[in-house]
Amino acid sequence: MATDYDTPRKTDEELHEESLEELKAQRVDAQSGQIDVDEAAETLELPGADLSGEELAVRVVPKQEDEFTCSRCFLVHHITQLAKGEGAKAVCKECN
């Protein structure tokens, strides 16, 4: 892109005023589309999503001998994911 060096340059004050006007315009635009999530959740109805009579049945399996709990992310990983430490100080490869 070519630059025309003969055009008059804007002063710092003019640039500052333009920046403020642009920021104000962006703020107004951003605020106009905001939705209160709590209000929307109360009135939001999804078709076929009435789960009030449903019960979840989940089988919980205790931690196995070849698994450990990461001391940073608190997730249970297979022993192959162990990066360092033992017992309560074990750290997985993702957190290392």
Image: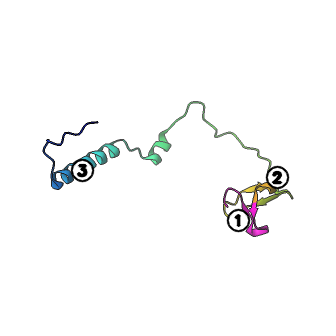
Residue drawn at 25 percent across, 36 percent down: 2
Residue drawn at 30 percent across, 45 percent down: 26
**Residue 86 drawn at (x, y percent):** 79, 68
Disc number lying in front (1 or 2):
1
**Residue 51 drawn at (x, y percent):** 64, 38
* Magenta stretch contains residue 63: no
Q: Amino acid at mark 2?
A: Val
**Residue 17 drawn at (x, y percent):** 18, 52
- Residue annotated with mark 3: 19
- Residue annotated with mark 1: 71
Give the number of marks: 3
The reply, left or right, for residue 77 in relation to residue 50 is right
Q: Amino acid at mark 3?
A: Ser
Taking depth in this image into account, of 59 and 64 the one nearest to the observer is 64
**Which one is earlier in the sequence, the residue at label 1 or at label 2?**
2
- Residue annotated with mark 2: 61
Q: Amino acid at mark 1?
A: Ser
User: In 3D space, how far apart are the residues under numbered discs 1 and 2 (Cα atoms)?
Assistant: 20 Å
